[in-house]
Image (cartoon, rainbow, N blue to C red):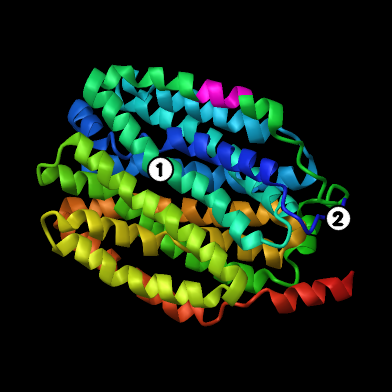
Amino acid sequence: MRPESEHADGKIICSLTLIHFIGDFFSSFIHPLLPVLVAKFTLSLTQVGILTGMARVMAFVVQPPVGYLADHYPTRLFILGGPLLVMVCISLIGLAPSFGVLLLLVTIGSIGSSMFHPTVAGMISTYSGRRFGLAMSIFAMGGTLSFGVGPVFISWLVASYGLEATPYSLFIGLAVMAYLFATVPLPREEGLRQFGLLGSLREAFGSVWKPVLLIWTIMTLRAYVSQSFITFLPILYSFQGYSLMSIGLLVGIYTISGAVSGLVAGHLSDRIGFKPIFYGAHFLAVPSIYLLLLVPGNWIYLNVFLSGFFLLATLPLGVALAQKLAPRGKSMASSLMMGLAMGTGGLMSPITGKLADTFALRSVLCAIALIPLVTLFLVRFLPEPGAYESKARMDD
């Protein structure tokens, strides 16, 4: 395994971020189109939860095995094949003749999304030099920014040309993929090939499994809140009479604010550490969400920005912290935080839908908004990675 440079390789970081952007750009089409799909297929809120939860189920099932394989067998199959799969399947959802076909397309597209996330995230530290927190935040920004731009784009496309126009979006994806095929390098060997599954887990997580599990728990709870809001806010706004374009704009603001806060959080984490960022973001997320749910009128645009800003800020930090604690299993660590944590949180989306079918949707979201307060208790036990990095250097 070659040593990692102290200097960042900006070109490769940008290419890896572009993979994240284009893959998630197509994945972002699902949520803003939910009101249209609900009308077309007469979906219940439980079915909405199943549809969006399926994307996270695939992350739950696919990302950990892909993370394991990526740490053992360097290949570009996951990096470039995953985005191709997601863009082809998701671009076809407008042609789905039934809910079953729609669910199948979303499921296969979600498999493609799950294929590239752990490998690409695992490569960031290799090329980030000393600014790992900032580089990981730039990478995460690619995904969150796409979830801001994508909803606006697909809402415009469908509002202008109808649901059947979604396949035209594929031309954008293919143009980007042509560039990525020419610029993205092969992942580096992590030195785990000689170990089996259990041996690899011991090598990667043996001495740090408790703090990694703690980070995963915090990230899972954060993901559940975030997934519940990104899934059901479009439905809530449609009930209130907002247009498809307005809903797409609100979803876009929500996620773009997360891209901004991720950059800020990554920069600050390189200077003051991870825990203060977790404390501040999770604490401020709660009043921001309540303002969003309870204050009507044009204030909704500011409040949706604040909610996304604080709720999404710690996503790149959880991935970065796990990779710092387990540097020999970067793809596996990424799959735990981006796949298993978000997948587990997404698996709970049908629960939110079921509760919303029974009680008022706004009341259910108000209850879920309290969950970040629970994570504040867990954050106090988070480690700063310096001690573990020092121990790892001594062991080497």
Please, what is the three-letter code of the amino acid marked with disc 1?
Phe
Q: Are there few (<14), some (14-19), or many (20+) residues within 10 Å of tag 2?
A: few
One can see residue 65 in this view:
no
- Name the side, left or right, on which 347 lies relative to 350: right
Please, what is the three-letter code of the amino acid marked with disc 2?
Pro
In space, the residues marked 2 and 1 are separated at their CA atoms by 34 Å
Give the x, y percent position of residue 286: 30, 70
Give the x, y percent position of residue 72: 79, 45
Residue 51's place in the image compared with 208, above or below, is above
- Of mark 2 and mark 1, the one earlier in the sequence is 2
Magenta residue span: 173-178
- Considering the whole magenta stretch, tell me its main secondary structure: helix
Q: State the residue position of label 1.
A: 147
Residue depicted at x 11% and y 55%: 297
Residue depicted at x 68% and y 73%: 385
Residue 12's place in the image compared with 213, above or below, is above
Residue depicted at x 59% and y 26%: 177
One can see residue 117 in this view:
yes
Q: State the residue position of label 2.
A: 3
Q: Is residue 134 rendered magenta in the image? A: no
